Image: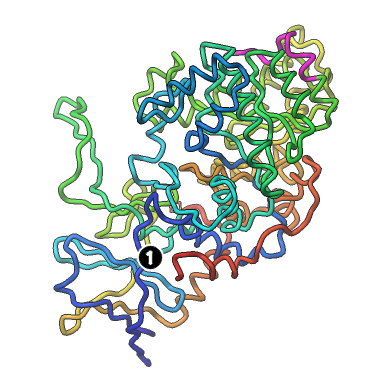
Amino acid sequence: MQQRTVKDVRELQEITIKTDTRDILSHATIQAEGLEDYFLIDIDAHVTESSFWNEIIDLIDNDVIRQMGQAMMMRPGTTTALLNTQPGTLYQHVFGRIPHQAVLAEAVDGSESHRFTELARRSMDAMGIDYQVVFPTPMLVLGMHPQEEIEAAIGRAYNRWLIERILPEDERIKGLLYLPFNSPEAAMDIVRDFGNAKGVIGFTVTCTRNRPVHHNQYMKLYAMIEETGKPLAFHSGFHWGDPSFLQLNRFISMHAISFVHYSLIHLTNWVINALPERFPKLKLVWVESGLAWIPFIMQRLDHEFMMRVCEAPNLKRLPSEYIREMYFTSQPLERSNMKLLEATFDAIKAGTQLLFASDWPHWDFDPPSSITTLPFLSEQEKRNILGLNAARLFNLEVKRMRPRAKDVLAARPGVA
Amino acid sequence: MQSILIGKAAAFPNPGRKVVEVEGVSVGVFCRDGKFTAFENVCPHMGGPVCQGKIIARVEELIAEDKTSLGLAFSKDHTNVACPWHGYEFDIATGRHQGNPRLRLRPVTIEVVDGDLRVTLPEGTRERIARRRQAPLREVD
Ligand code: FES
């Protein structure tokens, strides 16, 4: 056997918070070389808005609340003035093991865009994504804020920041408007004032809150959203301060249950109160709870519905039949048991209802290979889940928007 | 087959790590207590750059004889590398995942020859890694 000795080797550095997104994700770019003829939409990526929080505070309409926030920001070290930051937020990067969750502190020299736009573009290019829908991060728990008016003020300011600063910069970035759900009137104002803004493709309610979605006070809001034809997304999150979760002594335990817990409650209220019958054209998306919880709630509600139909008299079909018409995002995809996962895909009609989501830059993000490597999917199903289902749902043109993976790999700073 | 010379064994940080890339294949070389190990820089989870992650002592939970927990402590005997993509932790001595030892990093031959550290990659390594990246997921490698 012939042996050649290579002396010219390149040394690769440890990945840290300073590493460029394209270098962190270079292995995903290599994976994306095999997806060049796919169309990809990422339905859930995140802004770490705390990095730009003063920009959002400055956009608060109410003079007094804006002054409160600006005064808080003057204190050195404050990054999230007015927010109800939750215990556990800083546990997410597994204590330094997952740097991209801690912060993306890379340089963006030379870019004329907003820093966030540039970071989002890098992640899309590196993972081979054509369009990316962005959600906030610390604001995911804003629904638990004790002051409704603060949720409304911050929610509106964030929407303005998104619409005025970010979305015009890159047509590949799309937004779902934050609805301050604890103030139905303020939520309706958002739909009315910003629902048609460029780059806005829908609306979102963060699940981490104790508001019953079937309450009569929300019916006008749902009617308005249904009228726009744009989907309503329920985006879940965690909340270690919830009394039930105070028993859980590790972040892993709370995080594993918390997202699903809030999604279960809101989806159950939505179905049992027959909101799909009241708003048959309103398209619903459930974001960031994985998929394993869905077959559970389908079976449990079907089972109990048959015995207690008097409590859900407006349902004309089984609860699971309504759920099967909803949309779900894929991340964090539970992939440890292929038989269960395949059955789950079947139960939710994943081929038409599932939307790929990366959740980048969060610690449990999924690259597109989380879908392409599933052994039980047909080629067409993979294409649907990775982009075509979302294009249909959000009315996005199926059009190549990203650079070639090969060029991204060649241009990343780690190669220089 | 190709050999890669990565410097003098005596000059390698102990404990330490170096990740080298040659002709599209990257390999992590680790040293602990003077013993060298090397693994392909492709995480068995989703293909992340595992060898470029944080090196950190294994965390253990100490349990007393009466079965009460004495809390968490860093191990003096085991060192992990944590994949920077999602934090999977592998023992740098064995390449095995701490909690699920069936999942392991793919080892690469490393030896000290005349004081030089030499990593050897079989022919076709690059192509095999490329195939593996696109291959359907198996339950546990
Ligand atoms: S790719 Fe390494 S932990 Fe996921």
The quadrant of the image that shows the N terminus of chain A is: bottom left
Q: Chain of mark 1?
A: B
In percent of width and height, residue B111 lies at 23, 77
Q: Residue at x 25, y 42 (%)?
A: B59
Assess whether residue B90 is covered by the magenta stretch.
Answer: no
Closer to the camera in the image, A197 or A28 = A197
| Region rendered in magenta | A211-222
In percent of width and height, residue B25 lies at 43, 73
Relative side of A379 to A341, left or right: right
The quadrant of the image that shows the C terminus of chain A is: bottom left
Closer to the camera in the image, A164 or A253 = A164
Q: Pointer 1: what residue?
A: B106
Say above or below: A142 vs A47.
above
Can you name the residue that lies furthest to the bottom here?
A2
* Residue A128 sits in quarter: bottom right
Q: Residues within 10 Å of mark 1 (few under 14, many from 20)?
A: some
